[in-house]
Image (cartoon, rainbow, N blue to C red):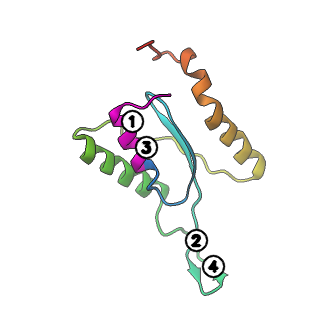
Amino acid sequence: MKLSPYGKIVEEEIRRIPGLDHYVLMPNHLHFIVEIQRAEWGTERSPVSAPTQSVSQMVRKFKIRVTKRVGCPLFQRSFHDHIIRNTADYQRIWQYIETNPLKWENDCFYTRE
């Protein structure tokens, strides 16, 4: 897909998200996988189960940065998230992200423009 000027800004900002693993930008939405790391103490992983930043905080910061650069909000208020719990789930979601552009012509918002 060819990115619009706004799409290029979104891509620049999504690449700034810590732990970004895989993403796709679509004309009217985006999908991405983020790996959340725990804080580390020395050479062993921290026993603390909470990451230093929540997914909601990451997405909020991303949306704010894009909105400031574009000059108007582009995103809806909420977002859908899913916790990937195993390898099979990861592979299924990675494949969905990878093949999503192939399905764009079937989207109800698709136009030839």
Badge nearest the viewer, 3 or 2: 3
How far apart are the two marked residues, 3 and 2, measured between alpha carbons? Answer: 25 Å
Q: What kind of residue is marked 4?
A: Pro
Label placed on residue 11: 3
Q: Does residue 2 show up magenta in the picture?
A: yes
Q: Earlier in the sequence, mark 2 or mark 1?
A: 1
Q: Which residue is mark 1?
A: 7
Above or below, 92 relative to 111: below
Q: Main secondary structure of the magenta part?
A: helix
Across the whole image, how many numbered discs are drawn on residues?
Answer: 4
How far apart are the two marked residues, 4 and 1, measured between alpha carbons? Answer: 39 Å
Q: Residue 8 placed where, x, y %?
A: 39, 39
Q: Earlier in the sequence, mark 3 or mark 4?
A: 3
The answer to whether mark 3 and mark 1 are in CB contact below 8 A is yes
Q: Secondary structure at mark 1?
A: helix
Label placed on residue 47: 4
Q: Secondary structure at mark 3?
A: helix
